[in-house]
Amino acid sequence: MAIRIERIILREIRLPLVHFFETSFGRTTERRIILVEAVAGGVSGWGEVTCGERPFYNEEWTDGAWLVLREFAAPRLLGGEVENAEAVAPLVAHIRGHRMTTGGLEAAVWDLEARRLGLPLWKHIGGGARSAIPCGVSIGIQESVPDLLKKIEGELAAGYQRIKIKIKPGWDVEVVREVRREFPHCKLMVDANSAYTLADAEHLRRLDEFHLMMIEQPLSHDDIIDHAVLQARLETAICLDECIRSARHAEQAIRLKACRIINIKLGRVGGFREARRVHDVARAAGVPVWCGGMLECGVGRAHNIALSTLPNFVLPGDVSASRRYWARDVITPPVEVTPAGTIEVRAEPGFGYALDLEFMSQITVRQETLSCA
Ligand code: NPG
């Protein structure tokens, strides 16, 4: 279905987190999120740019994303016809990197196309393997181990199916030991966000005794080969996140045995087209995947839910309830998690939730409408 996109509206919203979120590269207390609204024939599709406020997770950041969208990505879609949502990623593929940025735009067009067809987004992307998605939580680095244990206890009581804790040098083996002592049977994994090098291999091997589901991205954000060396030395499965930016990277990582699990983040790989390709490569190789999170507001969260209905998303992901992050979300109802630790997939067209436009306008700090000159 050809789409003539008439307008692309960029909004930056500011949302304070209910609790700071700390990783090995820093602490976030308030999000600055770019939402992308693509309009065609009176219908709007919505996407979220999932990059951080600072270029520390990868090279992208809010202010840079705004410029890339305005100067390079949006102009490619305005003023002509786009064949369909699948055709958006190739149109912006000449932009090197910046996949979370272009991915926010790409996802908006998928949502738009789904709405025009009257289909739920999950159906439109070929998902629907499950009607409720299994949820885990990601718990940032805390001020103290007792704080961490208390958090874990609360999340398990809420029903979440697996716990992921962030680690970094100085907050790793002994912390995991205490968590395991307190919670011997929960599904547990750790995420290092690239905080180690191969020189730490012996140290990381000490994590093997804790029966972790996986260790996520222990080594450099742009490395696959060292991960292969490390995986051969660990019993624990390595899951790659940062360094899988495309289906080609997934293929290479699997071929080199650099990981046994892949975290797919919609933005990191540039949107739904590439996310499905990564999913398919992993599935063909028998490598399970799960859906990562980037502290998204409701728009990105809803997209992640749709993505998580593809068949190979067999492990609980980092997609969790809105209330863990926001006092009020930009969608209604907010994303909620059942006592069984699942999110029910909704049947409405598009991403399945209503936008709270009134609240959104209150928290919008800049807005720009791009249209054909
Ligand atoms: O629940 O959205 C969430 C957070 C999931 O841990 C999570 N994200 O590296 O995967 C990550 C991490 C992250 C958090 C990355 C903050 C960047 C900033």
Image (cartoon, helix red, strand yellow):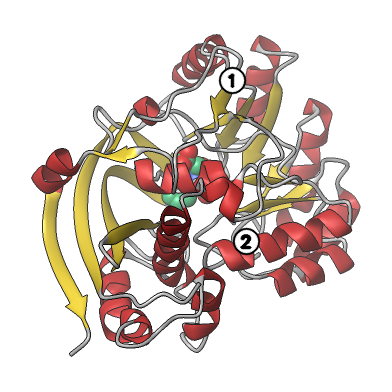
User: Looking at the rendered structure, which numbered label has been put on residue 275?
Assistant: 2
Q: Secondary structure at mark 1?
A: loop
Asked if the beta carbon under badge 1 is closer than 8 A to the nearest atom of ligand 1, the reply is no
Residue at coordinates 63% horizontally, 19% vertically from top-left? Answer: 179
Measuring from the top left, give residue 137's x and y in whole percent.
54, 30
Lower position in the chain sequence, tag 2 or tag 1: 2
Residue at coordinates 86% horizontally, 46% vertically from top-left? Answer: 234
Q: Secondary structure at mark 2?
A: helix
Measuring from the top left, give residue 260's x and y in whole percent.
82, 50
Whether 43 is drawn above or below 81: the answer is: above
Three-letter code, disc 2: Ala
Q: Is residue 91 left or right of residue 76?
A: right
Dot 1: few (<14), some (14–19), or many (≥20) neighbours within 10 Å? Answer: many
Q: CA distance from mark 2 to mark 1?
A: 24 Å
Three-letter code, disc 1: Gly
Measuring from the top left, give residue 61's x and y in whole percent.
34, 65
Kindly indicate the quadrant of the structure image that contains residue 11. Answer: bottom left
Q: Is residue 256 left or right of residue 182?
A: right
Whether 65 is drawn above or below 149: the answer is: below
Residue at coordinates 59% horizontally, 20% vertically from top-left? Answer: 341
172 vs 186, nearest the viewer: 186
Quarter holding the C terminus is bottom left
Total count of labels: 2
The residue under label 1 is 341
Res 221 seen here: no
Dot 2: few (<14), some (14–19), or many (≥20) neighbours within 10 Å? Answer: many
